[in-house]
Image (tube, rainbow, N blue to C red):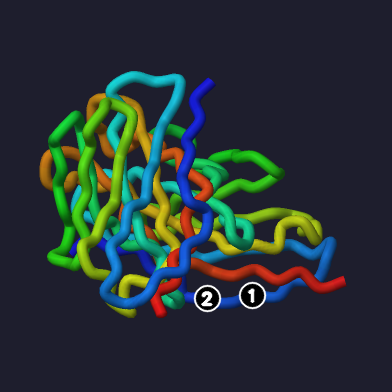
Amino acid sequence: SQTIHQWPATLVQPVGSPLSLECTVEGTSNPNLYWYRQAAGRGLQLLFYSVGIGQISSEVPQNLSASRPQDRQFILSSKKLLLSDSGFYLCAWSVTGSTRSDTQYFGPGTRLTVL
Amino acid sequence: AQSVTQPDIHITVSEGASLELRCNYSYGATPYLFWYVQSPGQGLQLLLKYFSGDTLVQGIKGFEAEFKRSQSSFNLRKPSVHWSDAAEYFCAVGVLWQAGTALIFGKGTTLSVSS
């Protein structure tokens, strides 16, 4: 069966510090991978989407970047965190290929607090 | 424009009472609709999804949802709520996005269950 891991589970970082959040998927090949951010009162915002190694699409300009160095690894990064980067970060995967009816399966999330 | 609206930010229901969570969508093509549930500090779990056929969809944990094209709605229901159903519920629509597909989420409805 497929599983999705995220770490760390919780992170507290000072403003201006770098960030690296990791997501890995097991039990499937060439998944579509997603990063979402959940901020209080704002629902889930899609940040990045990847259909394969080195292929990243971004939804909105922001202080964050994403990379996919391996087939089942997705990394969210920042060079300098802002207060507004605080939130709950969720990674998700769906099966390879791309249809609107595909289910996305979510990881447990990372709670990021920027002070 | 594609969007999902969940009009109720917070709902409180007595244990054993029935539940209906509202969801309205805006999408120009055939909608593929999803309901997810999120327990505090956790990732999202798929409850059910609609992509064709019968407009009444059965899901896990005794939930069901009815797709009504004329009302652009996909409301979630449960005949008898249990205390363990207290969580945040998200409605989403699958959309074409850049190189592939993505989910557009509503802002969520928080369900509290009173004894």
Chain under numbered label 2: B
| x and y percentages locating residue B16 in the rendered image | 84, 61
**Dot label at residue B8:** 2
**Dot label at residue B11:** 1
The outermost residue toward the right is B115
Cβ–Cβ under 8 Å for marks 1 and 2 = yes
The residue drawn where x is 48% and y is 38% is A5
The residue drawn where x is 34% and y is 55% is A36
Image quarter for residue A78?
bottom left
Q: Are marks 1 and 2 on the same chain?
A: yes
Give neighbour class at mark 1: few <14, some 14-19, many 20+ (Cα, 10 Å): some
Q: Nearer the viewer, residue B9 or A50?
A: A50
Q: Secondary structure at mark 1?
A: strand
**Dot label at residue B80:** none
Q: Is residue A76 visible?
A: yes
Q: Secondary structure at mark 2?
A: loop
Report whether B1 appears left or right of B8: left
The residue drawn where x is 47% and y is 47% is A7
**Which three-letter amino acid code belongs to the residue tagged 1?**
Ile
Q: Nearer the viewer, residue A88 or B6?
A: A88
| x and y percentages locating residue B57 in the rendered image | 54, 40
Q: Nearer the viewer, residue B28 or A36?
A: A36
| x and y percentages locating residue B102 in the rendered image | 27, 46
**Which three-letter amino acid code belongs to the residue tagged 2?**
Asp
Residue B96, relative to residue A101: is it above or below?
Answer: below
User: Marks 1 and 2, how far apart in space?
Assistant: 7 Å
Give neighbour class at mark 2: few <14, some 14-19, many 20+ (Cα, 10 Å): some
